[in-house]
Structure formats: C-alpha cells, structure tokens
Image (cartoon, rainbow, N blue to C red):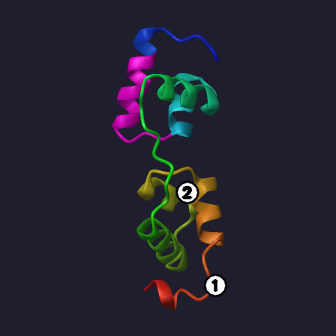
Amino acid sequence: MKQVTPAVRDQLVADYHAGLGIYELGRKHGLHRYTIAQHLTAAGVVMRRTITDVERTKAQNLFLSGATYAEIARQLKRDPATVKKMVLALPADPSPLA
C-alpha cells in the first residue's frame, strides 16, 4: 500500500463521505483506486458498492431517453464503466422496471 500522510488519508475519507467515488478520488489525489480502497478501509470507512434497484432503473430510463453513460454516471455519482455494466445487465424490455 502506497504511503500517504495522515492529512491525505483524512482528506480521502472526507471526500469519500462527501460523495466522491473511488475513481474520482484516484484522479484527484493521483492514487490507484485499489490503494484508495485500502486506505479508506484501514480508516474504518464502510465502502458503498451496492447498486440499488432504484439506481439500475434510473440508469436504464436515462439511457433509454438518450443520455450517455457519462451523463448518467454524473447523475448517479458512479464511474461511466460501472453505469455501462449496469445498463447492459438489465433486461432488454424495460416495462417491468417502469
């Protein structure tokens, strides 16, 4: 695990609690997402990784209305790659989700 100062670790925790995701933290602090996850876990932070059915439905509805993965990701505060996986994993017929 890459060494970070206590001040940087505190900032990682604060940023994560403020809603930034692992990828955003990586870009902001110049650290790999795995390193960030290790530091957050070591600091006692419970990681939010569960994608809710509400998020899945919202992602699919936005996608079907023409939004890009990047636009959906900004709204859901998720990485675009995560959004793409989320949308592609949903059934092709959106009627049960409406």
Is 10 one of the magenta-colored residues? yes
Instruction: Name the residue nearer the viewer: 17 or 47.
Output: 47
* Magenta stretch in the rendered image: 9-21
Quick one: label 2 or label 1, which is nearer the N terminus?
A: 2
Q: CA distance from mark 2 to mark 1?
A: 20 Å
Mark 2 Cα-neighbour bin, 10 Å: few <14, some 14–19, many ≥20:
some
Which secondary structure type mostly characterizes the magenta part of the structure?
Answer: helix
Instruction: Name the residue nearer the viewer: 5 or 45.
Output: 45
The kind of residue on which mark 2 rests is: Ala
Q: Residue at x 48, y 8 (%)?
A: 5
In terms of secondary structure, where does tag 2 sit? helix
Residue 97 screen position, x and y as percent: 47, 83
The kind of residue on which mark 1 rests is: Ala
In terms of secondary structure, where does tag 1 sit? loop
Image quarter in which the C terminus is found: bottom left
Which residue is identified by label 2?
70
Residue 12 screen position, x and y as percent: 44, 25
Q: Nearer the viewer, mark 2 or mark 1?
A: 1
Which residue is identified by label 1?
92
Q: Residue at x 63, y 31 (%)?
A: 34
Residue 81 screen position, x and y as percent: 64, 54
